[in-house]
Image (cartoon, rainbow, N blue to C red):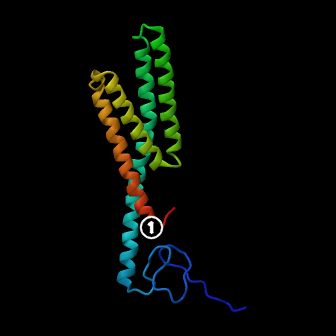
Amino acid sequence: MENQQLNLCACCANTFAQNDSYCISCGYPLQGTNEQQENHIANRAVKEIDLIDLNKKVETACNSLYWIAGIIGVSSIIGYFTLTDEDDVLIFLITTVIMVGAFLALAVWSKTKPTTALISGLSLYVIIQLLNLIADPSSIIRGIIFKIIIIVYLIKGVMAVLEAEKIKKELNIK
């Protein structure tokens, strides 16, 4: 057997063939000038720092799904005491449990699939608000600041997770 020398990329430590011009994994210019190689490593480091910041934003947005479940739960407890009709109370409790459960499930799911969970959470929240608007047009005004904050957090979270996925793809990170 022939003893082959193991070639490792200076940037990502993956193996490469002797005649490769660029690392297949990270795009490092194996046969480039020192300046090209240093620029590649510096650009990668900047993207990794950006990725850390984006992951923090994604985590905050994912946690907002827990907050939405909590806000719905607390506002439902308050709303429960204002209802007088027994039929309305039962329907109200059932829909509240379903909504809180859905947002809790999305929050848990966001740990493994943040993109899908955040988009689903944003869509569900907007649909709930639109249904509330149709049922009671004055409901849009109640808690408008909380509604805007929740929607903004979810939109920022979706944007951050999409940007993070783009950077992970560029850096060949899974």
Q: Please state the horizontal and vertical placement of residue 163, each as a whole percent of the image.
A: 38, 57
* Type of amino acid at the residue the image marks with label 1: Leu
Q: Please state the horizontal and vertical placement of residue 40, each as a whole percent of the image.
A: 38, 75
Q: Out of 148 and 45, give the one closest to the viewer.
A: 148
For disc 1, the neighbor class at 10 Å (few under 14, some 14 to 19, many from 20) is some
State the residue lying farthest toward the front: 134
Q: Out of 161 and 95, give the one closest to the viewer.
A: 95
What residue is rendered at 46% in x and 73% in y? 26
What residue is rendered at 34% in x and 22% in y? 135
- Quadrant for residue 153, please give it: top left
Q: Please state the horizontal and vertical placement of residue 4, each as a whole percent of the image.
A: 64, 89
Relative vertical location of residue 141 with respect to residue 41 in this rendering, above or below: above
Relative vertical location of residue 79 with respect to residue 111 in this rendering, above or below: above
What residue is rendered at 52% in x and 31% in y? 101
Mark 1 falls on what kind of element?
helix
Q: Relative to 142, is 87 on the left or the right?
A: right
Q: Out of 85 and 80, give the one closest to the viewer.
A: 85
What residue is rendered at 48% in x and 11% in y? 87
Q: Relative to 111, is 55 on the left or the right?
A: left
Mark 1 highlights which residue?
171
Quadrant into which the N terminus falls = bottom right
